Image (cartoon, rainbow, N blue to C red):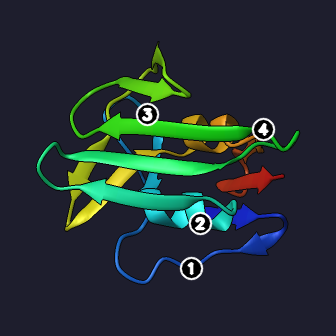
Amino acid sequence: MTVKVNGKEISFPDQQPYLNKDGRTMVPVRFISESLGAKVSWDEKTKTVTITGKDRAGESRTVKLKIGENKAVINGKAVTFDTRAEFKNGRTMVPLRFVSEVLGAKVTWDQNTKTVDINE
């Protein structure tokens, strides 16, 4: 699987993207968030990742995801998404489409080339 952000192919040094049991593309949270200009913090005690950034309109976004849950809090509002955040090989893995779209990016999948394109 290839992942591109704004046309640039991204390499993953220690944890490759994968399809989870729900058929969702999972990526390291820090990779996807920082590639889209957001910051990431981790709370070990609560197993919660917080992503702060802006969407394409320049609106602030704060997203909180807890490992093992399919719920997030976006700017204080609880939402449910279709798969759970996971911890794999020391990395917090999140659904690529959900996090990208919350941060205002457009995501497309090319089945023929197995390429995910993320564009701001």
Secondary structure found at label 2: helix
Q: Mark 1 points at which residue?
A: 11
x then y, percent, for residue 56? 85, 44
Whichever of labels 4 and 1 marks the residue nearer the N terminus, that label is: 1
Residue beneath the point at 64% across and 55% down: 114
Q: How crowded is mark 2: few (under 14 residues within 10 Å), some or many (20 or more)?
A: some
- Circle 3: element type: loop
Q: Can residue 1 be seen in this view?
A: no
Between residues 41 and 69, which one lies in front from this camera angle? Answer: 41
Q: Mark 3 and mark 2: span between their CA atoms?
A: 24 Å
Can you identify the residue that label 2 sits on? 34
Q: Earlier in the sequence, mark 2 or mark 4?
A: 2
Q: Where is residue 72 in the image (x, y as percent from the top left)?
A: 41, 27
Which residue corresponds to the image point at 44% horizontal and 26% vertical from the top-left?
73
Q: Is residue 88 visible?
A: yes
Q: How far apart are the alpha carbons under marks 2 and 4?
A: 17 Å
In the rendered structure, find residue 59 and report the number of the disc placed on it: 4
Closer mark to the observer between disc 3 and disc 2: 2
The image quadrant of residue 15 is: bottom left
Q: Which of marks 4 and 1 is in front?
A: 4
Mark positioned earlier in the residue sequence (3 or 4): 3
On the picture, is 18 further left or further right than 74?
Answer: left
